[in-house]
Image: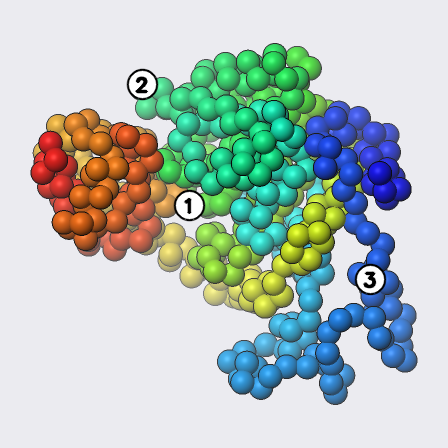
Amino acid sequence: MNPLAVELNELIQKNNPRTLEMLSDLGKNLFFPKGILSQSAEAKEKAHKYNATIGTATEKGGPMFLQCIQDKLKDFDPKDIYPYAPPAGKPELRKLWREKMLRENPSQQDKVFGMPVVTNALTHGLSIVADLFMDAGDQVVMPDMMWGNYNLTFATRRGAVVKKFTTFTSAGGFNVDAFKACLKQTAAEKGKAIVLLNFPNNPSGYTPTVAEGDALVATLKEVAEEGCNLVVVTDDAYFGLFYEDSLKESLFGKLANQHPRLLSVKLDGATKEEFVWGFRVGFITFADGMTGDSKEVLTALEKKTLGIIRATISNCPHPSQTFVIDALRSPDFDQQKQEKFEVMQGRALKVKDVLADAKYADSWNYYPFNSGYFMCLELKRVDAEKLRVHLLDKYGVGTISINSKDLRIAFSCIEEEDIQELFDLIHQAEQDLA
């Protein structure tokens, strides 16, 4: 094992040995090398004569660039576009995002948590979590209504076992009892569990109520107190798109510093929150389970994270980070974001209004939804994949079949005035097959 990895492990062991137990074998071996990057950083600070360290091209005291590209980006200084961004992301962006998190998540106030590290959006953050904490055979607890890419990221890449519980009760609430039973079974079998909480949920579009959220936190704390090491990941990709009665903040803040055996990890990003999907700007933030000062553990986890970034993508794109900084600093940012929120909320409420029509009763029920981009129909009479193909071939309507009975509808990309026609076409196609 590299001495730098040993040093980081010893730091974690000294401050919270339970966190060290949570790391995968790869996670224990990770470190951030003292190589070209650290030498270049030192030279940037001290090399006042010539700096011949980093593999970029310069001229006239700034980065070299092609004018045909700069002409399209003339509002931005070349130094904020062309050089490599730091492996952890631009410091100003990390600071601005942390401030945003605190404004939007009251439960994070007075909690000890790390500085967000920039990722290449949410999937990259999930991959980092998998590398840091998952060995073959480790169990990941999540609802059965889940994003399919979790299987590829956790099971295929790392050999983890996905343990699913029934998402909803018969009454239409989040099934906290099923979650608790699944988690306790995993705790008894392994003594360690990774828990994935994705709210607003993809594919169902559901965010728990405040009471359900508190019950989830209480369950996790109870299982930690019983001796199970828990890595709890909040996938907050659709954060902020809360349209009705639900939690209005991430569970990350309520989970932070709860118990030495409970490490919470927040994954979020500008990708969907700020409607910049192609920018690929996400964040990973850690909160150790210690109630006191756990900054040394957080520093060690951050350095291991930077080791993964350095070993895989080196660093995240610079221009998109600059664009997000510019947006977050804009005086029009909050107003424009509210306008888009209201458009999305209008679409969600229109879907509920349309689905209240009794003419659909023989064809489907729909799962609870109150947030995010999606909702799901639970089909009563036809196979979801057959309906998906028929809709596409005969009516030119695209949907996603989740399994044999569930059809996902992304209302996020349907204009409000088109929602009635959309569901009428789905209904007509369902009748064709039935």
Q: Is residue 177 above or below residue 64?
A: above
The residue beneath circle 3 is 36
- Left or right of 55 in this view: 393: left
| First of labels 2, 3 by sequence position | 3
Q: Secondary structure at mark 1?
A: loop
The residue beneath circle 1 is 241
Query: Is residue 377 in view?
Result: no
- Left or right of 356 in this view: 306: right
Residue at image position (46%, 52%) is 272
The residue beneath circle 2 is 170
The residue type indicated by label 3 comes to Ile
The residue type indicated by label 2 comes to Ser
| First of labels 3, 1 by sequence position | 3
Residue at image position (31%, 42%) is 400
- Residue 113 occupies quadrant: top right
- Residue 19 occupies quadrant: top right
The residue type indicated by label 1 comes to Leu
